[in-house]
Image (cartoon, grey):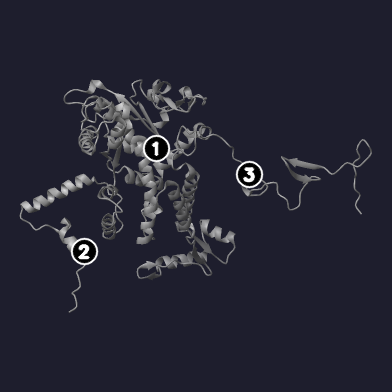
């Protein structure tokens, strides 16, 4: 029987067993866990398991999570995109499927809201169509100006600036556009409008002198008590530009809007949490896996290179000392000399190739190349699927490998990725493209370039209604160019879609499509040619089922 030690209190009575508590739950009795009991109601909160024991992240605000470590994350993301074909391909695919070659304006002023709020009946569909035609024509001349006066640096068109801004948003997490007013450029043969834009590297948006965040300053974004961004602090040069050492240590405070309401800064980023003031790139969550895959590639390549180097060795019945002496020594035994002289004078040949001569019991062996590893391809495939999930597009779009895909799976993958691409495109239009158009429209309306009813309010009073618009860019395309257009026609016939929507999905302006079709039909008639099937009438007649003859 074991001896037990009993502790006595000041009154001479035994003390009760020790019980430790954690919060409002009993954890231990006599220093040991309760049998079969757990203090954690959810496995996700447990630290008592091997899987969860060393997983103890902090609870922090989004700015505290991002701003302090942003430079390191962005530097790694950029290095990844520069040097990894998968990452570069993912960014290219997203840009090609959102901005494409160009983004075309489709002005859509909200004439119903204007008529309701102002009481001016002249705000109707006729006025809206006239406003649209003029606005789009003037915008095309401004956005595609050969002199590039829409760009502060006179290098890019507006579409190219939009593509660059979205690339920064994908890789760095932020798209930053600063609007400038350059009236000195407005003269015959030069700029027509004083408005111009500059795409700014998000690295330059930072706290002056790299100071830590404060209540009103968050990594270059100055906010008020309500959390509204009121100004942006931008370096005059990049922090690592040694040739601009003075400017890289100077910051300019730029107000979000001027006193007259003219927008100065357009800052667009994808928000993951409330209260967030800076964004993160799409590869942030998979950076470590990209690095592991790159390391795996390097290890496999080294192993394959070593194994593919044709290694040979000699097996011999003699001990190693004799073999080493025979190989490295200056002279061989008289018998070996005799054999060597004999075979040198009379080499054994087979079809012109010399057969190696070996001593009795010797043979030549080679090292078999066992690399790449048998599971290497599947491992790479699994990593590619992870990258595809993070970027929002299919693995086939990243790798351009469609060998494992049939029509059904390809269409399903493209439809799912198209939803994400459409959402990204819509958010970029709302966050960057439409504000850029509204900034230009402000000046154009102040100049009196747009048709307006009598006593129409100023732009600033109803800028949301005046600047309402859509953007046409790259078309979705078709996996099957026969079945899918037929489906579009059926949807329009059933009233489930419109020509405007179907054209927009293919990056076309439906009004231009109608005008062009009418022009081509007129050309056919003027030339005395038979109208083709795509004119519509023959196709309609062919699709109408014939009536069966009435039985007599």
Q: Is residue 446 visible?
A: yes
Disc 2 marks which residue?
543
- Which residue is at a point 26% across and 47% down the rendered structure image? 500
**Sequence-wise, which precedes: disc 2 or disc 1?**
1
**Sequence-wise, which precedes: disc 2 or disc 3?**
3
Disc 1 marks which residue?
169
Quarter holding the C terminus?
A: bottom left
Image quadrant assignment for residue 540: bottom left
Disc 3 marks which residue?
54
Secondary structure under tag 1 reads: helix
- Number of on-image labels: 3
- Which residue is at a point 42% across and 46% down the rendered structure image? 391
- Which residue is at a point 5% across and 55% down the rendered structure image? 528
Secondary structure under tag 3 reads: loop
Q: Front-most of 246 and 41?
A: 41
Q: CA distance from mark 2 to mark 1?
A: 48 Å
Q: Nearer the viewer, mark 2 or mark 3?
A: 2
Residue 135 drawn at (x, y percent): 23, 34
- Which residue is at a point 47% across and 41% down the rendered structure image? 284
Viewed as shown, does residue 506 lie left or right of 331?
Answer: left
**Sequence-wise, which precedes: disc 1 or disc 3?**
3
Q: Vertically, is 202 above or below 548?
A: above
Asked if labels 3 and 1 touch by Cβ distance under 8 angstroms, the answer is: no
Viewed as shown, does residue 467 lie left or right of 357?
Answer: left
Q: Nearer the viewer, mark 1 or mark 3?
A: 1
Q: Front-most of 162 and 135?
A: 135
């Amino acid at each position: 029987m074991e001896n037990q030690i009993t502790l006595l209190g000041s009154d001479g009575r035994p003390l009760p067993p020790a019980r430790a508590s954690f919060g409002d739950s009993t954890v231990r009795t006599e220093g040991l866990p309760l049998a079969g009991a757990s203090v954690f109601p959810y496995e996700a909160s447990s630290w008592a398991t091997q899987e969860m024991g060393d997983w103890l992240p902090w609870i922090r605000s989004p700015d505290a999570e991002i701003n302090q470590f942003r430079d390191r994350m962005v530097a790694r993301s950029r290095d990844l995109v520069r040097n990894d074909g998968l990452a570069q391909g993912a960014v290219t695919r997203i840009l090609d499927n959102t901005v494409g070659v160009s983004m075309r304006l489709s002005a859509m002023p909200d004439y119903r809201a204007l008529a309701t709020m102002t009481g001016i009946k002249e705000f109707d569909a006729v006025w809206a169509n006239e406003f649209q035609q003029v606005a789009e024509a003037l915008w095309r001349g401004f956005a595609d100006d050969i002199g590039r006066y829409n760009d502060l640096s006179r290098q890019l068109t507006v579409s190219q600036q939009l593509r660059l801004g979205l690339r920064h948003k994908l890789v760095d997490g932020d798209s930053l556009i600063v609007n400038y007013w350059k009236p000195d450029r407005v003269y015959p043969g030069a700029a027509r409008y004083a408005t111009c834009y500059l795409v700014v590297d998000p690295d330059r948006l930072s706290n002056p002198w790299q100071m830590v965040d404060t209540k009103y300053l968050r990594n270059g974004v100055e906010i008020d008590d309500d959390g509204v961004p009121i100004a942006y602090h931008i370096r005059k040069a990049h922090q690592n530009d040694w040739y601009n050492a003075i400017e890289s240590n100077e910051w300019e405070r730029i107000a979000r809007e001027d006193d007259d309401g003219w927008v100065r800064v357009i800052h667009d980023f994808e928000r993951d949490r409330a209260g967030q003031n800076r964004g993160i790139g799409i590869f942030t969550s998979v950076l470590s896996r990209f690095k592991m895959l790159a390391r795996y590639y390097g290890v496999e390549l080294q192993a394959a290179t070593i194994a593919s180097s044709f290694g040979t060795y000699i097996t011999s019945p003699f001990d190693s000392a004799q073999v080493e002496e025979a190989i490295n020594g200056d002279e061989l035994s008289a018998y070996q000399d005799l054999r060597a002289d004999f075979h040198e004078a009379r080499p054994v040949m087979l079809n012109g190739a010399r057969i190696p001569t070996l001593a009795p019991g010797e043979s030549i062996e080679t090292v078999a190349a066992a690399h790449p590893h048998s599971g290497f391809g599947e491992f790479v495939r699994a990593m590619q699927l992870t990258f595809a999930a993070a970027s929002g597009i299919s693995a086939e779009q990243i790798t351009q490998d469609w060998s494992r895909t049939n029509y059904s799976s390809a269409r399903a993958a493209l439809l799912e990725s198209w939803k994400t691409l459409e959402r990204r495109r819509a958010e970029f239009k709302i966050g960057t493209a439409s504000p850029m158009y509204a900034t230009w429209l402000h000046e154009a309306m102040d100049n009196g370039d747009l048709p307006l009813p009598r006593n129409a309010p100023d732009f600033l009073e109803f800028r949301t209604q005046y600047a309402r618009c859509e953007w046409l860019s790259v078309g979705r395309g078709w996996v099957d160019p026969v079945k899918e257009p037929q489906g579009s026609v059926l949807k329009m016939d059933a009233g489930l879609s419109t020509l405007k929507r179907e054209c927009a999905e293919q990056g076309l302006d439906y009004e231009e499509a109608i005008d062009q079709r009418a022009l081509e039909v007129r050309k056919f008639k003027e030339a005395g040619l038979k109208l083709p099937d795509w004119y519509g009438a023959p196709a309609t007649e062919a699709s109408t089922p014939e009536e069966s003859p009435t039985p007599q």
